Image (tube, rainbow, N blue to C red):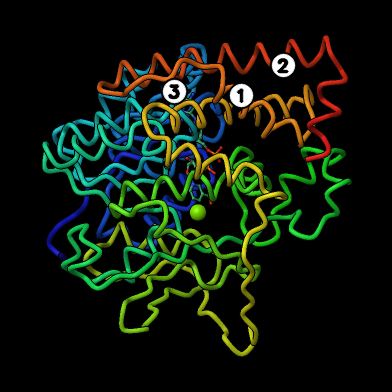
Amino acid sequence: MNTMVRQITILGSTGSIGESTLDVIARHPDRFQVIALTAHNNVEKMLAQCQRFKPRYAVMLDAVSAEQLALKIAASGLSTEILSGVESLEKVAALPEVDAVMAAIVGAAGIRPTFAAAQAGKLVLLANKETLVMAGRIFMDLVKQHHAVLLPIDSEHNAIYQSLPVDFNGDFQRSGISKILLTASGGPFRRTPLSALENVTPEQACAHPNWDMGKKISVDSATMMNKGLEVIEAHWLFNAPAEKIQVVIHPQSVIHSMVAYIDGSIIAQLGNPDMRTPIAHAMGYPERIGSGVADLDIFKVAHLDFEEPNFDRFVCLRLAYDALKAGKNMPTILNAANEVAVESFLNRQMKFTDIPAMIEYALQNTSHKSIITLDDVLETDRETREVAKEWLQKSHSQPQRRLNYSSL
Ligand code: NAD
Ligand code: MG
């Protein structure tokens, strides 16, 4: 490995996962070379990253941001080529010189470039769980067909990956696996009285007790939709039926998930809640490399607690299990409606308790179809967003309707 430099594209480099990835890369200049960085529209952060990591390409989704960046890059004497648009995201994910792609764009926007990386047979380091939720079967088939290698970055899935036998081939019976135990912190509202949830603000929802993350996933953690999306993610990554995935609330976030075997063994992965551990695991794979994460002080942790999730408190978790069991395009609808709901909540257009209400409405009112191609996925995504916005309009014209849901 010391003779091989892994050449990397980071999709979503200005985000929380993107920055943690660059932090790990900076610790190993002999192992990694950044070929391309991408972002939505944060020009200043991208400029600073380009100055430090000197990538060959930088892509801004937004064309105006790309123009601004290009001027600054030229002024600073760098030779980084600046591109824009979704096609350019796809291009840098599939460049022949790239070995590995960190897929860390948030939400459905990540699907096309992540697909491009799989199609080009790359080592895909997958943080963008939404790709698997929206298009699990198609994506897993694509990975297989193009001999891509998929490693999970999501801390739970990375922990499960580390706790599975090395020769695991998706057959629970053959490997003697009885269950996956998917841990969840329970978020900031684990103990909040149900009646107080409707007055929760975006600031409170984004203040996660253990993890420092982007806004969307922080709200998802507060509703536990994040865990719901992760149940679906685990289903596709590990070929796990819904009934073999048990969500466990573990408030300390020290055990990042576990695999239970038929002989009574449970194998777990533990560590401090810092995404640089799963990132370093996947980036260095199959070798272990330093991540900058402090050793876990088990004496300081002292206690590990576990609780069963309450589906009345965390309605989104129930909706996700239901969508997975219903199949077809239901998980795609779930994901798109959740994105609209989280955005509307963050923009203060609706209450925290309206999030599951909007999603449930979208699940019922969007056309139910089979998903065969990526276009089917994108069509369901588009239709769902319209249906979800229709709920918002209706709820504003009928305030009564929102009160009903707020008692969830
Ligand atoms: P973030 O909001 O901090 O960063 C998102 C990144 O995506 C930014 O670089 C942003 O510029 C880019 N982006 C946003 N919208 C875009 C668009 N329309 N087109 C192109 N690029 C766009 O998000 P994050 O917390 O880093 O999460 C990224 C992904 O990783 C998510 O799918 C999330 O579920 C997953 N994940 C995050 C964590 C975490 O600790 N943050 C943990 C597990 C999984
Ligand atoms: Mg996670």
Of 368 and 27, the residue lying toward us: 368
Q: Which mark is residue 230?
A: none
The C terminus: image quadrant: top right
- Name the one closer to the observer, 160 or 26: 160
Q: Is residue 47 visible?
A: no
- Which mark is in front, 3 or 1? 1
On residue 340, the disc is 1
Relative to residue 372, is residue 225 drawn left or right? right
The answer to which of marks 2 and 1 sits earlier in the sequence is: 1
Residue placed at 40% from the left, 79% from the top?
266
Say if mark 2 contacts mark 1, CB within 8 Å: yes
Q: Earlier in the sequence, mark 3 or mark 1?
A: 3
Q: Quadrant of the N terminus?
A: bottom left
Which of the two discs, 2 and 3, labels the residue nearer the N terminus?
A: 3
Residue bearing the label numbered 3: 60
Tell me the quarter of the picture where residue 264 sits: bottom left
* SS assignment at label 1: helix
Left or right, 350 with reference to 33: right
Taking the image as drawn, is residue 304 in sight?
A: yes
The amino acid on which the numbered mark 1 sits, given as a three-letter code, is: Val
Label 1 near ligand 1 (CB < 8 Å): no
Q: Position of residue 105 (x, y in %)?
A: 45, 35
Q: x, y percentage for residue 275?
A: 49, 58
Numbered tag placed on residue 392 in the rendering: 2
Whether the residue under disc 3 has CB within 8 Å of ligand 1: no
Q: Nearer the viewer, mark 2 or mark 3?
A: 2
Describe residue 147's horizontal placement relative to residue 177 as left or right. left
- CA–CA distance in space, label 2 to label 3: 31 Å
Q: Residue at x 44, y 23 (%)?
A: 60
* Residue furthest bottom as drawn: 299
Question: How far apart are the two marked residues, 3 and 1, measured between alpha carbons?
Answer: 23 Å
